[in-house]
Image (tube, rainbow, N blue to C red):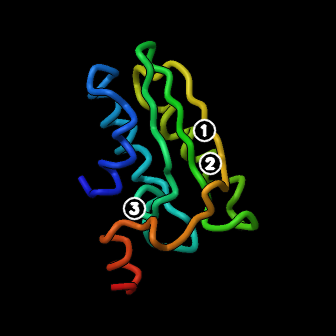
Amino acid sequence: MSEQEKDTVATTSESQGGELREKVIAAIKTVYDPEIPVDVLELGLIYEINVYPVNNVYVLMTLTSPSCPSAEVIPGEVEQKIKDIEGVNDVKVELTFDPPYSQDMMSEAAKLELGFM
């Protein structure tokens, strides 16, 4: 697990569905920005993941820009991938632009993949 994943997931305690949390992370890692060949977690677009005891999932995320052409597609895809996980009760994906996205939020793997390292 990358440092970005560890930081993102740190908001969810171990007792709150550790196995489900891992499935949520795996599902999120299958969502890619169509213009960038890196998943949204490695890009640093996921700010927070919370898995609650009743198997509700909350995700706070951003996009690379408020005018991103995929602004309606990516959050919807994140939500649907999580909803498809067996055992998930409800999913809420909230979009924010605070703090604004920057390339510093990318994992080292993403920076390497995109040639920034």
Q: Which residue does the numbered mark 3 point to in the structure image?
A: 42
Residue 83 picture location, percent across and down = 52, 31
Residue 107 picture location, percent across and down = 36, 66
Q: CB under 8 Å between callouts 1 and 2?
A: yes
- Marks 3 and 2, Cα distance to the nearest angstrom? 15 Å
In this rendering, which labeled residue sits more in front, label 3 or label 2?
3
- Marks 1 and 2, Cα distance to the nearest angstrom? 7 Å
- Marks 3 and 1, Cα distance to the nearest angstrom? 17 Å
Most distant residue in the front direction: 99
Q: Which mark is residue 3?
A: none
Q: Which element is circle 1 on?
A: strand
Q: Amino acid at mark 2?
A: Pro
Tell me which label, 3 or 1, sits earlier in the chain: 3
Residue 110 picture location, percent across and down = 37, 71
| Residue displayed at 60% across by 32% down | 92
Q: Amino acid at mark 1?
A: Val
Most distant residue in the left direction: 1
| Residue displayed at 38% across by 86% down | 115
Vertical order, 56 against 108 (above or below): above
Quadrant (top left/top right/bottom left/bottom right) for the C terminus: bottom left
Tell me which label, 1 or 2, sits earlier in the chain: 2
Q: Residues within 10 Å of mark 1 (few under 14, many from 20)?
A: some
Tell me which label, 3 or 2, sits earlier in the chain: 3
Judge from the rendering whether residue 46 lies leftward or rightward of residue 98; answer left or right: left
Q: Which mark is residue 93?
A: 1
Q: Residues within 10 Å of mark 3 (few under 14, many from 20)?
A: many
Most distant residue in the right direction: 67
Q: Which residue does the numbered mark 2 point to in the structure image?
A: 75
Q: Amino acid at mark 3?
A: Glu
Q: Which element is circle 2 on?
A: helix
